[in-house]
Image (spheres, rainbow, N blue to C red):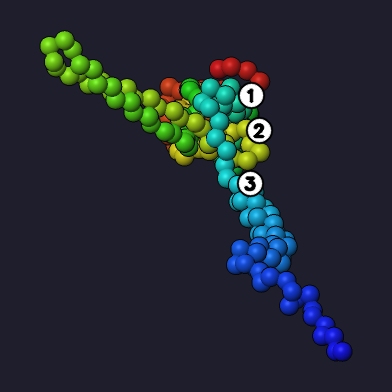
């Protein structure tokens, strides 16, 4: 008698399409999962790196105090720069000798700062008893100063220097009327100010 061996595959029922798809998905899923995670991580890192270079914005009221402090400091620095320039020029003039200069500015710096603003409009319609319609629009503006990364001073778009209130020059050779007049004319030309804002005195005493 001959016995015929029947394999398990011949006895088992053929797989349905649903089972075939599930088995295929199980085989592919581990291969797809790892590349997908890597792609998501790369996108997150790219977005983070791009976001770090943008200039942040802060509300106006939070930046006012820092802005005022910076302006006072800059005015003092500007006065010192003008004094230094005058001393350097006046000391080159004949007969002037040693010079001391004090400059006073009349007002603060006028600066226009970069802002990030948005405008919101809200329109409301109301009906009255007579059948008429009334429409009202409410406009809300929100402005924020643009601050560079790591800085306490807002971005300046335009700056106008303040006027000179007065200049005091104390010069070693100012006791000579001709030297005093030359100093007076030089300061008036350099700073483009009127004569009444310039006071020239000799060093060691007042005329």
Residue 128 falls left or right of residue 6? left
Asked if residue 182 can be seen in this view, the reply is no
Pointer 3 local density, CA inside 10 Å: few below 14, some 14–19, many at least 20? few
Q: As drawn, which residue projects farthest toward the right?
A: 1
> Which of the pair 91/128 is nearer the observer?
128
Figure quadrant of the C terminus = top right
Residue 83 point in image, percent of width and height: 59, 32
Q: Whole-percent x and y of residue 141? A: 40, 27
Badges 2 and 1: C-beta atoms under 8 Å apart? yes
x and y, in percent, of residue 118 in the image: 42, 33
Query: Can you identify the residue that label 2 sits on?
Result: 98
Comparing marks 3 and 2, which lies closer to the viewer?
3
Q: How many marks?
A: 3
Secondary structure, mark 3, is: loop
Which mark sits nearer the N-terminus, 2 or 1?
A: 2
**Residue under circle 3?**
52
For the view shown, which residue lies furthest in the front direction?
Answer: 1
């Amino acid at each position: 008698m001959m016995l015929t061996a029947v394999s398990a595959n011949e006895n088992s029922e053929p797989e349905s399409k649903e089972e075939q798809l599930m088995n295929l998905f199980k085989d592919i899923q581990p291969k797809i999962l790892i590349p997908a995670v890597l792609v998501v991580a790369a996108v997150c890192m790219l977005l983070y790196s791009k976001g770090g270079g943008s200039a942040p914005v802060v509300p106006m009221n939070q930046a006012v105090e820092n802005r005022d402090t910076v302006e006072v400091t800059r005015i003092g620095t500007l006065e010192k720069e003008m004094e230094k320039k005058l001393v350097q020029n006046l000391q080159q003039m004949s007969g002037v000798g040693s010079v001391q200069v004090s400059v006073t500015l009349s007002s603060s710096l006028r600066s226009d700062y970069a802002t990030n603003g948005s405008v919101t409009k809200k329109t409301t319609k109301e009906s009255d008893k007579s059948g008429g319609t009334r429409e009202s629009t409410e406009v809300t503006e929100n402005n924020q100063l643009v601050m560079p990364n790591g800085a306490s001073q807002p971005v300046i778009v335009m700056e106008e220097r303040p006027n000179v209130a007065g200049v005091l020059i104390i010069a070693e050779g100012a006791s000579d009327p001709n030297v005093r007049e030359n100093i007076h004319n030089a300061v008036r030309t350099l700073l483009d100010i009127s004569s009444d804002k310039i006071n020239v005195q000799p060093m060691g005493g007042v005329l």
